[in-house]
């Protein structure tokens, strides 16, 4: 049992309550609340391997979060993967990239990309340092985060992990996540690329594609991102797309307090981005899965 799961269980045993939010890229944020009023007391973000299973069995805090049923009867004959899970039919195409959910075979190839390296050994771009682990652990993290995000999907609390493909080869991932999207109309993004694919403009192009889905097809009003001040690549992508400063976050990693820059992109500024070369298909059957139909 990891320390993070043990902490959560102790909190439950004391009679208090908790909520899991923002599952993304293999991480989940746990909000610890009082037992009477449900007021937030503390929160922490973790990539502990035994947390996603626990979070996946929790009751939804409010609303009806069952997976949507098809709006029309399925055709006679065997069901396809897209019939069962319409998100597999969602595809974003940019001039050089394709973003979509991967099959398990493709996910295994993506895991190899992570095993081969996501950043230089001297860099530490992630709050949860999964990419600093041994190659096999990095590969397993990719599989675990992809599978858990699907298993925990709810229309009011979702995280879409899109694999980034270049000519059918996976090179990284972009995550688009939201809670209570129907009301808040706000998403957050996170991403990583295999080291050989850095500094080629793929990060900007992939984020632009993911944000096109969020703003132009799902009706987002805002998109947010966070990055350490020395993460020039992430900050550079955000700057190109028009994000503006939105304060800071203070978190702890390895006993050290770290400051992250919070960034926010509003719809008015988003509209000035050129996305004429981006095509998004397969959205309509997925709308209710995002809580917006």
Image (tube, rainbow, N blue to C red):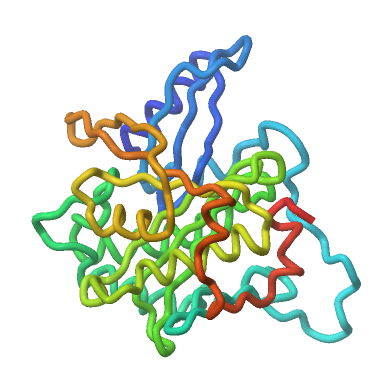
Q: Residue furthest bottom?
A: 167
Is residue 155 or residue 134 the one in the foreground? 155
Tally of numbered discs = 0
Q: Residue furthest top?
A: 36
263 in relation to 78, above or below: above
Residue depicted at x 46% and y 84%: 95
Residue depicted at x 61% and y 58%: 215
- Quarter that holds the C terminus: bottom right
- The image quarter containing residue 136 is bottom left
Q: Position of residue 184 (x, y in %)?
A: 65, 40
Is residue 261 or residue 55 the one in the foreground? 261
275 in relation to 179, above or below: below
- The image quarter containing residue 242 is bottom left
Is residue 119 or residue 146 the one in the foreground? 119
Residue depicted at x 27% and y 76%: 200
Q: Position of residue 249 (x, y in %)?
A: 34, 32
Q: Position of residue 41 (x, y in %)?
A: 47, 16
48 in relation to 107, above or below: above
112 in relation to 224, above or below: below
Is residue 114 or residue 125 the one in the foreground? 125
- The image quarter containing residue 238 is bottom left
| Relative to 50, 233 lies left or right | left
| Relative to 3, 25 lies left or right | right
| Relative to 120, 208 lies left or right | right
| Relative to 267, 127 lies left or right | left
- Quarter that holds the N terminus: top left
Residue depicted at x 17% and y 30%: 256
Q: Position of residue 208 (x, y in %)?
A: 47, 66
């Amino acid at each position: 049992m990891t320390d993070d799961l043990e902490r959560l269980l102790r909190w439950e045993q004391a009679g208090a309550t908790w909520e899991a939010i923002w599952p993304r890229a293999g991480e989940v944020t746990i909000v610890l609340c009082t037992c009477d009023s449900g007021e937030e007391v503390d929160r922490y973000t973790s990539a502990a391997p035994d947390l996603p299973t626990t979070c996946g069995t929790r009751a939804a805090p409010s609303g009806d979060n069952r997976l949507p049923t098809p709006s029309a009867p399925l055709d006679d004959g065997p069901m396809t993967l897209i019939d069962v899970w319409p998100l597999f039919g969602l595809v974003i195409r940019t001039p050089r990239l394709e973003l979509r959910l991967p099959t398990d075979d493709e996910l295994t190839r993506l895991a190899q990309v992570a095993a081969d390296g996501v950043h230089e050994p001297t860099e530490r771009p992630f709050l949860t340092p999964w990419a600093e682990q041994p190659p096999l652990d990095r590969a397993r993290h990719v599989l675990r985060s992809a599978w858990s995000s699907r298993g925990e999907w709810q229309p009011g609390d979702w995280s879409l992990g899109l694999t980034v493909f270049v000519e059918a080869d996976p090179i990284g991932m972009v995550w688009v996540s939201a809670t209570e999207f129907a009301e808040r109309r706000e998403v957050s993004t996170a991403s990583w690329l295999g080291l050989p694919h850095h500094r080629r403009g793929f990060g900007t192009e992939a984020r632009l594609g993911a944000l096109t889905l969020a703003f132009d097809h799902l009706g987002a009003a805002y998109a947010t991102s966070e990055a350490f001040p020395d993460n020039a690549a992430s900050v550079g992508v955000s700057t190109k797309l028009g994000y503006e400063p939105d304060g800071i976050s203070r978190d702890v990693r390895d006993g050290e307090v770290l400051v992250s820059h919070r960034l926010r992109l509003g719809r008015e500024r988003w509209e000035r981005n050129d996305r004429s070369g981006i095509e998004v298909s397969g959205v309509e059957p997925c709308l209710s899965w995002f809580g917006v139909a």
